[in-house]
Image (cartoon, rainbow, N blue to C red):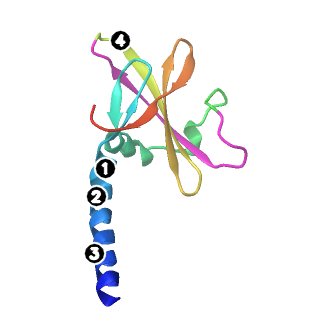
Amino acid sequence: MKFLRAATVAAMAGLLLLVPAAYGKMYYQCVSEKTFTVSAIEKYKKKASIDQVRSDDPEVITGQQCKAARFTERLQNKVKMSYLFQVVGMEPSYRLFEYNESTWQPCILRNGLK
């Protein structure tokens, strides 16, 4: 029994080591096909504030605290795009949007290689 317990602990420790590696492969893909790694987007977490939330931003669940950060990026075709990064809730979850065709379009969180 002690062996099984030790083997289970060792296996769990090994799995925990894989979590950062898998997390590092996650990225957001926007409507324009522009992609952002999760680690690249997380730098906006510190810049996000309640003051940057606007009434025309995508809605969050009622009662959830929301902070926002805004930035622009140039696409390969030199078009300048606007992005909205939202930090939602006390245990924050992140949402990324691209302003496309006069509306905020959600960027999809994907797992794997770009």
First in sequence: mark 1 or mark 3? Answer: 3
Taking the spot 36% from the left edge, 42% from the top edge, the residue there is 38
Dot 4 corresponds to which residue?
A: 79
Q: Are marks 1 and 3 in contact (CB under 8 Å)?
A: no
Q: Nearer the viewer, mark 4 or mark 3?
A: 3
Q: Which residues are magenta?
A: 59-76
First in sequence: mark 4 or mark 3? Answer: 3
| Numbered label attached to residue 43 | none
- SS of the residue under disc 3: helix
Residue 108 in the image: x percent, y percent? 46, 32
Q: Are marks 4 and 3 in contact (CB under 8 Å)?
A: no
Looking at this rendering, what residue extends furthest in the front direction?
1
Q: Is residue 114 left or right of residue 98?
A: left
Q: Nearer the viewer, mark 1 or mark 3?
A: 3
Dot 2 corresponds to which residue?
A: 18
* In front of the other: 80 or 96: 96
Q: Nearer the viewer, mark 4 or mark 1?
A: 1
- SS of the residue under disc 4: loop
Quadrant in which the C terminus appears: top left
Dot 3 corresponds to which residue?
A: 10
Q: Are marks 2 and 1 in contact (CB under 8 Å)?
A: yes
Dot 1 corresponds to which residue?
A: 22
Residue 105 in the image: x percent, y percent? 53, 23
Q: Relative to 35, say whether 44 is above or below.
A: below
Quadrant in which the N terminus appears: bottom left
